[in-house]
Amino acid sequence: MAKDIFLSWSGGKDSSLALYEIQKSNTHSVAALLTTITEDYDRISMHGVRRALLEQQAAALGLPLKKIFIPKDATNATYESRMQALLEEGLREGIDTVAFGDIFLEDLKLYREKNLAQLGMKGLFPIWKRDSGELARAFIDLGFKAVLVCVDTAILDPTFAGRPYDQDLLRDLPPHVDPCGENGEFHSFAFDGPVFQHPVHHTMGEVVRRDRYCFCDLVPAD
């Protein structure tokens, strides 16, 4: 029988690949997605995607969604305390594992494992140490579809915001940019693919610059 776990869900391609690998393995079952939302903006933290689209995404995946609300400019302590409260709910339900879509950032993995260990929980990393280029190509070849919603303009040209995550984009990425954006070069929103029951319909909205970040606003189409 598959073990129930939580999946840390940013709404992007790495989360989607992690979910795909979990569902393929049949050893674990995602009981709920966990997503951090900046309450001042009502959007996914860092990614800038509207909460309404996140909720449509979870519905298209057929999975429950648990939201962690944090204020803008939240400290690590605030984030950790609010996440802890939610995870403790999971523990009471018998869930002691949280999966993540991390690929190769050792310090981030250690940070997650340390915080989970303090609660008697553990982490699961389904795509850990997979080659970024191979993962990027696999995402596209599997039929996933995503769009870049946030670009760090200190690393990548702002014109990449709003572009579909496809072979053309991979060819156009500068050599210093990780093809999965693992170093924070860009963030994405996945809206279709093998883990989705149906596409998440949206239209392209305004492209906005906020300090060094360029965001492409996605607007729910339904």
Image (spheres, rainbow, N blue to C red):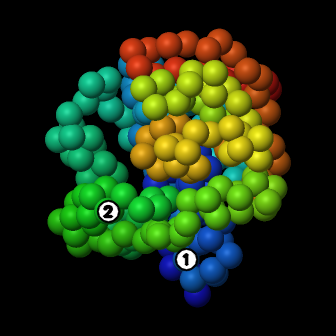
Q: Residue 90 appears at what percent x and percent y?
A: 37, 62
Look at discs 1 and 2 and give the one toward the viewer. 2
Residue type highlighted by circle 2:
Glu
Q: Residue 221 appears at what percent x and percent y?
A: 79, 24
The residue at the point 51 percent across, 79 percent down is 3
The residue at the point 21 percent across, 64 percent down is 114
* Residue carrying label 1: 28
Q: Residue 56 appears at what percent x and percent y?
A: 68, 38
> Can you tell which quarter of the image residue 112 is in?
bottom left
Residue 62 vs 208, above or below: the answer is below
Residue type highlighted by circle 1:
His
Q: Residue furthest front?
A: 175
Q: Mark 1 Cα within 10 Å, few/some/many (few <14, many 20+)?
A: some
Q: Which numbered disc covers residue 106?
A: 2
Q: Which numbered disc covers residue 78?
A: none
* Sequence-first disc among 1 and 2: 1
Residue 182 vs 23, above or below: the answer is above
